[in-house]
Image: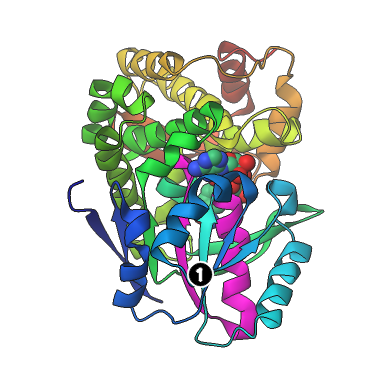
Amino acid sequence: MGDPIRIDVAAPSRGYAVWVGSGVLRQLPALLDQVGLGPRRFVVSTPPVWKHWGGSLREVMPDIEAIPVPDGERFKTLAQVSEVYDALVRANADRQSVVVTLGGGVIGDMAGFAAATYMRGIGLAHAPTTLLAQVDASIGGKVGVNLPGGKNLVGAFYQPWVVAIDPDVLSTLPRREFRSGLYEVIKYGMACSRDLYDVILKDLSAISRRAPEALTPVIAACCRIKAGVVTLDERDTGPREVLNFGHTAGHALESVTRYQRFLHGEAVAYGMLVAADVAAGRSILSSANQSALASLITKLGPLPAVSDLFTRPILEQMRHDKKVRDGRIRMILPTDIGTTMTVDDVTDLEVKDALVRCGVGA
Ligand SMILES: NC(=O)c1ccc[n+]([C@@H]2O[C@H](COP(=O)([O-])OP(=O)(O)OC[C@H]3O[C@@H](n4cnc5c(N)ncnc54)[C@H](O)[C@@H]3O)[C@@H](O)[C@H]2O)c1
Ligand SMILES: [Zn+2]
């Protein structure tokens, strides 16, 4: 086990370190001590994660107080936050108490929001356990919950004090969840870094086997990119937008299928193919690069079907997206491997043709 990689997030509201490396979970107590978090530490986790990794954490942190919560996006609610508050109150948690989130993005967002608001904010550390949470959700300080009327409608910007990313924990992640996270990793490469993209290609089989020595540098590269944009744009008003590559059509696909068909990364994979198709149609992306992206995505395995979906509701949904101005759709288009441009004049016809070429029914 080598030394973990340290990435600094210099967000205006709070700077902190993200540690990436095999075995980092066991170093969590030392990392919390280092930033002065303690002494009472509450771990919020969920059975599928706790059953595999709770023991390791307890070995190094015997005093840890566990707050178990039920698993799944449908529990990313105010009611669940309220249950966490109740558990904190029952345990007499005070302002010096700390919440450690051990789980995927759902746990990080929900319990992070509880930490941001309990007694107007207590200490928070993330130990993300899905690839998606390791490369995206755990960095940047967005915490919150869903309302019946929509996703992530209530929340806050609340940066953690430390993030501990251990690729070893990915060994127990369901295969489909892991692959879904890999599409977000490809997003970072395609949108921001040819170096990362090349590493993904070169090490794809070791990455797919989840070899920690292959995963560590790749996760760290994604975290560096995310840390960079968060530093520039903590509250997501502009520069963070590049990380929405693949998300305009991706969100629409998730929404028209009521979040039942796709895992988030899978929808983003389609979204990247759609954006690449629009870009190639405008001759701002070469067809060689378009095919390269498509072949990388295909290599990871099959995506859920889209042939039974229709373009019209997807387009409607894209037009409802906040990125729309004057009926023209705003999209992040790839211009090369590692670079993008934002356009806000994409026509319905361009999107429709791209969707159909990506497999959507007419
Ligand atoms: N805050 C942000 O900036 C941000 C960014 C992206 C996504 N998100 C949010 O993240 C959420 C999605 O997160 P997710 O994809 O991590 O899903 P998730 O948290 O639901 O985790 C997916 C599944 O994997 C299980 N799991 C997690 N780690 C495991 C492990 N190591 N071994 C075995 N099982 C494990 C979970 O219990 C769950 O069943 C969404 O709510 C989304 O809105 C937030
Ligand atoms: Zn995403």
Quarter holding residue 276: top left
Report the residue at 65% width, 80% height from top: 91
Magenta stretch contains residue 116 = yes
* Image-based side of 136 in relation to 30, left or right: right
Label 1 Cα crowd, 10 Å radius (few <14 / some 14-19 / many 20+): some
Q: Which residue is mark 1?
A: 64
Secondary structure beneath disc 1?
Answer: loop
Q: Residue placed at 61% from the left, 44% from the top?
A: 48
Instruction: Please say whether residue 323 is visible from this viewpoint.
Output: no
Residue 354 to residue 224: above or below: above
Q: Is residue 60 left or right of residue 263?
A: left
Q: Amino acid at mark 1?
A: Ile
Question: Which range of residues does the magenta coloring cover?
Answer: 104-132
Residue 286 position in % (x across, y down): 32, 18
Q: Position of residue 308 (x, y in %)?
A: 74, 14
Pick the residue in front: 50 or 204: 50
Residue at 38% x, 75% y is 14
At x 23% / y 29%, what residue is drawn?
199
